[in-house]
Each structure stands twice: as structure tokens, then as C-alpha cells.
Image (cartoon, grey):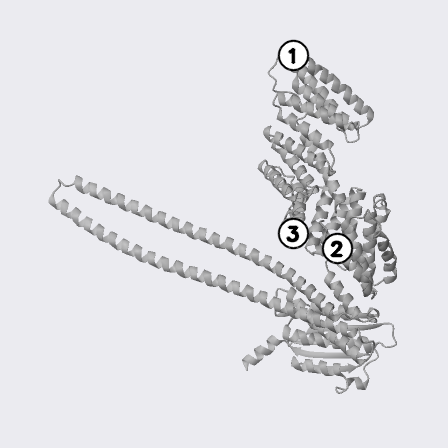
Amino acid sequence: MKPGLYIAVAVLFFILITTYNASCQSFIELDRATPNTNHIQTDTNQVLLLLKSSKDLIMKSDVTKAEVDSSERMMKQGGHLAYKLNYLRGQGNELLIYALILRQRKRNDQSFKTALQAIKVFAKINDFAGQADGFNIIGDGLSNNDDQIVKRISYFQKAIHMLFKSGQKERAAILLTYLGDLEIWSSRYDDALKDLNHSLIIFKSIGYKKLQATYDLIAYDYLHLGNINEALKYNLLAVQTAETNGESGTLLSTIYNRAGLTYSFADNWQKAVEYQKKALHQAYKMKDSVGIVQISLNLGGSMLKSKNAAEAIPIINSVKSFKVFQEDNSGKARVATLLLRAYIQKKDYKSAEIYFKEVKQFIALKDIEQNVYVKLFSGIIAYYQATNQFEKTYPFIAAHIKYRTTLKVSVPIDDNDDLNLFKADSAAGKMFSAVRHLQRYMFLSDSLMSEKNRKQASLLEIQFEADKKDRDIRFKTKNIKLLTRQTQLQKISFRQERIIRNWIIAASGLLLLVIAILYNRFRLKKRNNRFLEAQHLSLQVQQEEINKKNEDLVYLSEKQSTLLKEKEWLLREIHHRVKNNLQITMSLLNIQSSYLETGFALDAIVNSQRRMQAMSLIHIKLYQSDNLAYIDMSSYIPELVGYLKDSFSDGDFIIFELHTPSFQLDISQAVPVGLILNEAITNAIKYAFQGRNTGRIKIVMQQDNNEVYILKIIDDGIGMPDNKGDKKKSFGMNLMRGLTQQIQGDFCIENKNGTTVTICFKDVKLMIEELSKK
């Protein structure tokens, strides 16, 4: 069973109903074009009225056996009258209704043969719409099983062909959309994209507005083809169109859910959660238990990716009360895996162990979907790593690699196998193998980032080429207008000269005085023309020089813009590399620390790791920011505090109070300030609250009227002993003092109801301005 099957079933059902209703609009309607007598006209209309009443009964969604019998009686009456009148169209419609009745009675073979007979009757009178109805009924009677779906697709293609021949574009486009959905179901993604785009073109040509289902299927097809950008583009079009048209119910739930799925492929988990919540709301409104279960699990997975296990757990547990969940082993396995990961994320290993045992039991089952099977291995690996049982992960990592590489489904699958092997080898002391797997993991991560940058560069290049072509077109348009004006001036000049020449010939018989005057005027005119031509040539030369200078300026501007972008990419790459190198060093220190149990050496390594993390956060912020020279301290300080809090077992009992308004520091000051914060907070956590269960650390960073930054780290602990303030005996204090001197600031420690570390320093921009004034 394919991923997302339940939602796909829902949208297939919706489109099936829409398609079938639209396809039957011309099925059995009054014949207004028959050129017979009034008596015969009345008889044929009576045939169609009987058959239409019969059709309305049999096509009800909840038709009863009595209604089927009534439909058959009216069908036979209409058919008897049609044969009496030799009315072929009525005979064909009778056969179509009988095919529907036979299918309702589960006599599919006879239904198939009856529909073929109807098609032959319609072919005799060249009724293409009737033939389309016959092919549609045959195709609708087949299933989506592997042995029938190819035939089903072929019959719908024949129906579409007949609808085009009959000129019924809207019905053809609706059936094309349904055909595209079937082709996605059968993994014929290229064919599906072709047919869905064809239906979209037809819909737009006839002004059809309800395009949300078509947009959604195109997005889903692009997702299978691996084109995330196009998939997201059509997802958003589907959402916008559905909301504009007031769409609701199962289709809107499907559209929201698939938009969330695309965002999850793009690692935008915040947006994935946003759209999956909307999808779940719609599913609950429709009381769609299948959709509720599927979307709830998707939403729970996205919340775990967003590090929100507390909110994810009740949503995941909510599906257990639904009957459709209780009958689905794949769903049960998926729930167990998600809850296992949630409790690991919460570091509640006792609860995680319960679901770990469930996950191991599901591995032995054979009716688990392949993509869920792969996630079972991921959950087991995560549990063993979280509980420091690294040596047990090797067989499950191998199984994960085996199944992941053969997986052909559209779901995000973790592929951190090299990182898992690095952790296992590190714990086992296999240093060379560990470093090799770590390098491979970092290389793959860098490759993915480089590919992303390459795509962005390609988009910029395409945009640049489009702008360049637009400029060329505008330049050519201006030249054409200039040449047109010149031609018009020449025509006017030629016309004037012709008039003058004709006038001279006509006046040749006048007196010599008149001839002399005309001659002088002619010469004067020629002189003026030469003067105008000289001026025109001069202006043309000047215009060419101006155009050349403008082109040079445009070229220089574009080149400068390209160089600036390249510089920005290089700086961003440097910060990325520095961050990677710091993380590799931290990983190596972590490996080294695993060989040390206690002592000063272990403390020194752990302290070094924290200092490197403080610097690494700086480079991560720079890499993610548009500004590569300044750090936003209002976001950096909370992240650093969160890291230090998680790195100590006592961190959960300490309350941190942060007062850090939004301002930015130059990187030359941000790194020392980050290290000072790391040292001060580490010392407070380690020493200030000994013998206590609670404590408070307050961090204040502000700017006074003289544009001086003041950083205070205040704790309400036991205070600092005298020997802790001795510079010769405390490396941390020496480091903080040295870093304060590096940023040309003042360092102060106070012992009053705890310890207060105060640092005052000026902004580096202010110091540069003061030096320039001196």
C-alpha cells in the first residue's frame, strides 16, 4: 500500500463523483433536435423522460434494492417504446442504464458486455457523447488492482477521445484530471503530468474556475518526480484557489495535507505543521476517520522534527480510538515508532523502553508498509544511541541501509547512516573508521548545501538572462522607432522637394525677376537643409556615444553586482566551513572524553567543547543570516543559554531570566562576548548553587545614553569565595578578564546576595569613529 493512500482514496472518491456527475450531464436528456412530427417528438421525449427517471434512481449514492427494481421497470418501459419507434438513441441509453443496474447487482461481466452493446448502438448514429458514456461506465466498473488498472486507464482514454470529438471540452477536462490521478496511482508520473497539464489548459480556455483539484494533483505528481519547487508552486496554487472558491471538506483537507507533505520534503517543518493542522481541522469537521488517522500521524511526525514532543504525543495517541487504526498493523507500527522517538526526545527513557519493545515486535510482521518498516529500524537505532548501547546498532544500521536504498515512495526518510556509524565506531574505539564515516557524513551534508546553492545560482542566472533579453528588446524597439522617424523625415523632405521642383517647372514661363527670386529661395532652402543634415549627423554621433556609455555603465553595474554576490557566497561558505571544523573538533574531543572517567582532563575537554560551541553558534548565525558581519544578540544569547542548560544535569533546576533587547554586535566583539557568557554561566551553574535544588541566573544586556554596552550575569547563589577571584588560581576568570581587555572594556565582579559579573564596552563602530576624529 502506497504512502498517503488513505488521503489519495478520499480525493479519488471526490474526483470520481465529480467526474461521473459531469460525464452524465448529457446522458439521457430531452431530444430538442429531432426534426420529426410533433407526435413522434412527444413519443421520443417520453422515452427520454422514462430513462432519465430510471437513471436518477440507479445513480443515487445509497440506492436500495427496491429502488434498483423500480429503476429497471422504468428502464424497460422506456426501452420498449424506443424499440417500437426504432429510436436508436433511446435504445443506447436503455443499455447504458441496464449496465449500471447490473453493476449494482454485482454482475460485472454482464454489465461490461451490455455497455459494449450500447457503444455499438451509439456508433451507428455517430453519437460520440453516448460512446463516451459507455467507455466511462466500463472504466468505472474496473478496479485499481495491478491486473485491471491498465485496462481502466485505456477505457477512460477512449471516453476522453470521444468527448473531444463531440466538442464537450469541460467533461473531457474533468475526465483528464481523473485519468491523471489514476496514472499517479499506477506510478506513470510523466503520463500523469502530461494529462493534468492538458486538462488545466482546457479549463483555463473555457473559463473554468474550480481548478484546485487539478493543481493539487499536479503538485502531487511533481513531488513523486522529485521536483520540490514545482510541487510547492502548485500546492500553493491549489490552496489559494480552494480558499478563493470556498472549498471545504475532504478535498480541502487533502490539499492542506499535501502542502504540508511538500514542506516536509523541503525541511520547512514549521510550515508543514501549519498546513497539517489545517488539514486535521477539516478532517474532524467531515468526521473522516481515515483522514484523521493519517493526518494526525503526519502532524505528529512534523512536530517531532520541530522538537515539539510534548504537543506531538497527545495528537499521536488520539488515533488509537479509531477503528480504522485498530485494523491496520502499519498504522500501529508507525504510532509505536513516533511515540518511541517522542519519549527519546523528552529524555524519558523509561517510557521510551515500552514502545521500543513494541517496535521490535513489529519487525517480525510481514504486512507492514515498506516505508514504515524502514522507520522501525530508525527508531531502534535512536533508542540504542540514546541509552549508550552503540554496539547493538550495527545490524539495524545495515538493515536500514538495505531497505532505504530500495525504497521507492514519496515520504521523507532519514539517511544519517554514516552519522550513526560514526557514533557506534566512536563508542567501540574504532577511531579510523569513525573519522571516515564522519568525513563522509560531512561531505554529503556539504554536497547537499552546494547543490542548493547551485540551484539558487541557476535561478539568479535565469533571472539575469531574462532581464538582459528584456533590455535588448527595449533597445531594439527604441532603434526601430528612431529609424521610423528618420524615414518619415526623409519622406517629408522628398515630398517638399518634389513640390518645389514641380512649381519651378510650372513657373518657368514667368518673368525673369520671378525666376531669380525663386532661384534665390531654392538656394537658401538647400543651405538650410545641409545645415539641418549636419546637425542631425552631429546629434546621431552624440546619441551613439551616450548609448555606448550607458551600455558600459550597465555592464559595470552587473559585473559589480555579480562580484558582490560571489563575495557574499564565499563569506557564507567560510563561516560554514569554520562551523564544520569546530563541530569536527568537538566530535573528536567527545571521542577523547569517552576514554576519561573523571578528573581535570575530562573537565578541561568538556569546558573546551562548550567554548567551541559558543563560537560555533556565532558562525551558524552568520551563515544563516543575510548580514555576514553582525550577530543579533537577542537570538544568540537564548540559544547559548539553552545549550548550556541542556549540557548540565543540574540545568533543569535553574531558572534563567533574560533581558536582551534586539541589537547587533560586530563579529569581532560577538565572539569574545559569547565566550565571556559561556564562562560566567558555566561557573554559576557549577559552583553557585551547591547544596540547593533551585537557583536563578539573570542575564541583562543593555546600552546606556553614551552608547556603551553593559552586560551583567547575576546569580542568587552562595557567592564566590576569595580564592575564586584570584586571577592566578582561576583560568576562567583570567579568560574573562583577557577577553574584556580584547574588546577594550571594563570587567567587574561583585559578591552581594550572590555573584554579579559586569562587563562594559563600547561598540566597535563607535571606537572607530572616535579614532578617526583624533
Residue 16, x across and y down, in percent: 71, 35
* Kind of residue at disc 3: Ile
Of marks 3 and 2, which one's residue comes earlier in the chain? 3
Residue under pointer 2: 402
Marking on residue 39: 1
The crowd level at tag 2 (other Cα within 10 Å; few <14, some 14-19, many 20+) is few
The residue depicted at 83 percent of the width and 43 percent of the height is 324
Of marks 1 and 2, which one's residue comes earlier in the chain? 1
The crowd level at tag 1 (other Cα within 10 Å; few <14, some 14-19, many 20+) is few
Task: Tell me if 696 is positioned left or right of 142 in this view.
Answer: right
Under circle 2, the secondary element is helix
Residue under pointer 3: 228
Residue 405, x across and y down, in percent: 72, 54
Would you say the residues marked 3 and 2 are in contact, meaning their CB atoms lie under 8 Å apart?
no
Q: Is residue 461 visible?
A: yes
Q: Is residue 244 visible?
A: no
Under circle 1, the secondary element is helix
- Cα distance between the residues tagged 1 and 3: 63 Å
- Name the mark nearer the viewer: 1 or 3: 3
Under circle 3, the secondary element is helix
Vertical arrangement, residue 662 with respect to residue 142, above or below: below
* Kind of residue at disc 2: Lys
- Cα distance between the residues tagged 1 and 2: 76 Å
Q: Quadrant of the N terminus?
A: top right
Of marks 1 and 3, which one's residue comes earlier in the chain? 1
Q: Quadrant of the C terminus?
A: bottom right
Residue 111, x across and y down, in percent: 74, 26
